Each structure stands twice: as C-alpha cells, then as structure tokens.
Amino acid sequence: MKTYYNPEDLKKFSNIGEFDKPLADKFFSWYGDVFAEGALTAREKSLIALAVAHAVQCPYCIDAYSEDTLAKGCTEEQMMEAVHVAAAIRGGSSLVHATQMMNKVKELTM
C-alpha cells in the first residue's frame, strides 16, 4: 500500500547524521539515555512513547513503539488503554480552550 509516509523510511532514521553527524550523535545519545531503565521501567517508557506517538500523530513512532511495547511484554489491551489516555488528553486540551471561546462570545454579546 502506498502512503505519504514510507514505512521503509523508519529504517533510515539512524542516517539523519549524514547531514549533521555531531548533532545526530548528541540526539541518539540523549535518546538512548531517556529510554534506559530509571525511575520508570523501559516497558513503562515504551507505553508512554506509544501514547505520545499517537498524540503527535507520528506514523513512524507508532510503528516503532507498537513493535517495542509488544517486545517488552505489553498486551494489546494495555497498548489501547495508553492510546486512549493520549486521546483523552488531546481531546481535553482542545475542549479546555472552549472557555476562551465562551469568554470571547460573552464579551461580544453582552
């Protein structure tokens, strides 16, 4: 299936250093540290990444973290629950701005 995003491009992610190796090296070093075991487990971080991938609508990240969370032992139910958390935050963040619209409408109509 042809899409705007080529799934094969995910495999080329490590090549971003081709145009600026020093910055790419810094990014990948930091990225590796972020996803290392810490106060949160690597599994928890992978679920967070999966949820964020949906919030920022990154198809490459969704593919990568769907695979990663499965590899780390997450269930389909846990993955979907994480996506729903992201959707709830996205939806809520849109709706909370309704207060600004309501304030403006009241200002204009009073």
Image (cartoon, rainbow, N blue to C red):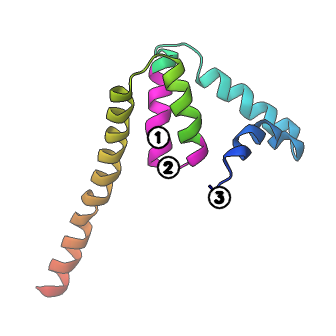
Tag 1, which secondary structure? helix
Question: On residue 80, which mark appears?
Answer: none
3 sits to left or right of 54: right
Q: Residue at x 50, y 42 (%)?
A: 53
Q: Circle 3 is placed at which residue position?
A: 2
Tell me the residue at 25%/57% (across/down): 96
Q: Nearer the viewer, residue 63 or 52?
A: 63
Residue 37: image location, x then y, percent: 55, 13
Nearest the viewer among 86 and 33 is 86
Mark nearer the N terminus (3 vs 2): 3
Quadrant position of the N terminus in the picture: bottom right
Name the amino acid type tagged 3: Lys
Give the quadrant of the C terminus.
bottom left
Q: Which residues are magenta?
A: 44-60
Tell whether position 84 is magenta: no
Label 2–label 1 contact, CB within 8 A: yes
Residue position for label 2: 56
**What kind of residue is marked 2?**
Val
- For the residues labelled 2 and 1, the Cα–Cα distance comes to 6 Å
Which residue sits furthest left? 110
Q: Position of residue 48 (x, y in %)?
A: 45, 31
Using the numbered discs, state the Cα–Cα distance from disc 1 to disc 3 in whole angstroms.
25 Å
Q: Secondary structure at mark 2?
A: loop
Q: Which residue is mark 1?
A: 52
Foreground of the two, 54 or 41 = 54
- Are there few (<14), some (14-19), or many (20+) residues within 10 Å of tag 1? many
**Which quadrant holds residue 13?**
top right
Residue 73: percent from left, percent from top: 46, 16
Give the Cα distance between marks 3 and 2. Answer: 22 Å
